[in-house]
Amino acid sequence: MLVHTTIANGIATIELARPEARNALSREMIAALGAAVDAVARDTSVRALILCGAGKGFCAGMDLKAVADDPVAMGEMLRALSRVSRAIRRLPIPTIARVQGAAVGGGCGLMVVCDFAVTHPEAKLGYPEVDLGICPAVVAPWLMKKIGAGAARAMLLAGGTMSGDEGFRRGLATHLVPEGELASTAQALAERLAKGGPKAIAATKALLNELDGSMDDAIAEEAAEISARIIAGDEAQARLKAAWARG
């Protein structure tokens, strides 16, 4: 299974399960993640969600190498990631990303779309898309809501990655703890959040989503189309192939 879901004491944990690939997002994994999120949304016993990755990394981003000769498939993956991100954002329960190791590109997008993110100083975070000739439009709306328009502009245009410590200072994470304390910190936070009144939490999240534009499908869909168009172009294809050749 590419995604594992467990539910205990009102807390759901969705785990990305491709540790051999640092949980890079394949087409199949994105579909499985979407199904897992939908199942959690239907389960009225769930009061909080922890999103995590198996192994050494949270999520190394999109597994574009798996569809290296198919730009159309790359575009479909970007559109699917946009849909999954919106589904996570719109869950009526608090969501926590538990981030170890790498969370880059689309993986960092999943991190910031959650309400909370717990990471450690040595993590590798960021958005290197422009370095590869890719437009980070799918993640841009969520990053802007997380850290503000000016800070998001500087981060996305500069590309590259940063440490978990720097990412915390720049607003990507809400909690910074030693790596060995990630699981216990995320669990304790989920347990505390799960004690809130479910109707009050759901109403508060719905209002916040309306206020910050998280319910605007048109912007999210346009962003996905921009990313899909750019990734199919000559510049992105040449840079991606060069990167894959370097290993």
Image (cartoon, rainbow, N blue to C red):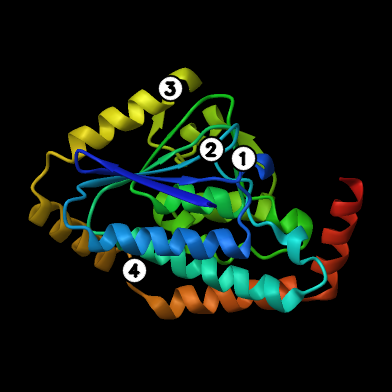
Which numbered mark, 4 or 2, is in the foreground of this view?
A: 2
Are there few (<14), some (14-19), or many (20+) residues within 10 Å of tag 1? some
Q: Position of residue 97 (x, y in %)?
A: 41, 42
As drawn, the label of residue 19 is 1
Q: Which of marks 3 and 2 is nearer the N terminus?
A: 2
> How busy is the neighbourhood of tag 3: few (under 14 within 10 Å), some, or many (20 plus)?
some
Going from the N terminus, do you reach mark 3 or mark 1 first? 1
Q: Could you tell me residue 29's position as x and y percent?
A: 56, 58
Amino acid type at image mark 1: Pro
Q: Residue at x 37, y 59 (%)?
A: 37
Q: How far apart are marks 3 and 1 (CA)?
A: 22 Å
Amino acid type at mark 4: Gly
- Residue placed under numbered mark 2 in the picture: 54
Q: Check the image and report above or below for 214 versus 153.
A: below
Q: Left or right: 226 with respect to 211?
A: right
Is residue 241 shown to the viewer in this render?
A: yes
The quarter of the rendered structure image containing the C terminus is top right
Q: How crowded is mark 4: few (under 14 residues within 10 Å), some or many (20 or more)?
A: some
Residue 147 visible from this viewpoint = no
